[in-house]
Image (spheres, grey):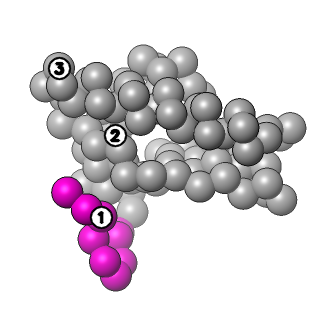
Amino acid sequence: MYFVVERFWPGSTETAALAAMERLRTSCDRLSTAGVAVRWLGGIFVPSDEAVSCRFEGTAQAIRAVHEFAGESFDRILPMVELGDQPPG
């Protein structure tokens, strides 16, 4: 199942958002290696909305674990439908 995770992050910068995404990607890789079925699919930073959105494949529970492991907060996890080209993998 695919999910989008949203974080409303007032005062964030592109540098901070990129660092957070790297921590999430790394945590995803580590948990996946440990047998947790979760995959990082990418993210975006919208400066004008002070928001970060990241896409994952897995379960909501696994995605929460990724965020906990990375020390990153989020506001909500929403199931999503991928339209158009499917992510690589």
Q: Label 2 crowding class (10 Å Cα cut-off): few <14, some 14-19, many 20+?
A: some
Please name whichever residue, 83 or 27, is drawn nearer the observer in this view of the structure: 27
Q: Secondary structure at mark 3?
A: loop
Q: Label 1 crowding class (10 Å Cα cut-off): few <14, some 14-19, many 20+?
A: few
- Residue linked to disc 3: 34
First reached walking from the N terminus: tag 1 or tag 3? 3
Amino acid type of the residue that numbered disc 3 sits on in the rendered structure: Ala
Q: CA distance from mark 2 to mark 3?
A: 17 Å
Point 79% across, 54% down: residue: 47
Position in image of residue 43 (x %, y %): 52, 52
Residue 42 appears in the picture as rendered: yes
Amino acid type of the residue that numbered disc 2 sits on in the rendered structure: Ala
Q: Which mark is residue 15?
A: none
First reached walking from the N terminus: tag 2 or tag 3? 3
Amino acid type of the residue that numbered disc 1 sits on in the rendered structure: Pro
Q: CA distance from mark 1 to mark 3?
A: 22 Å
In screen coordinates, is 62 left or right of 27? left
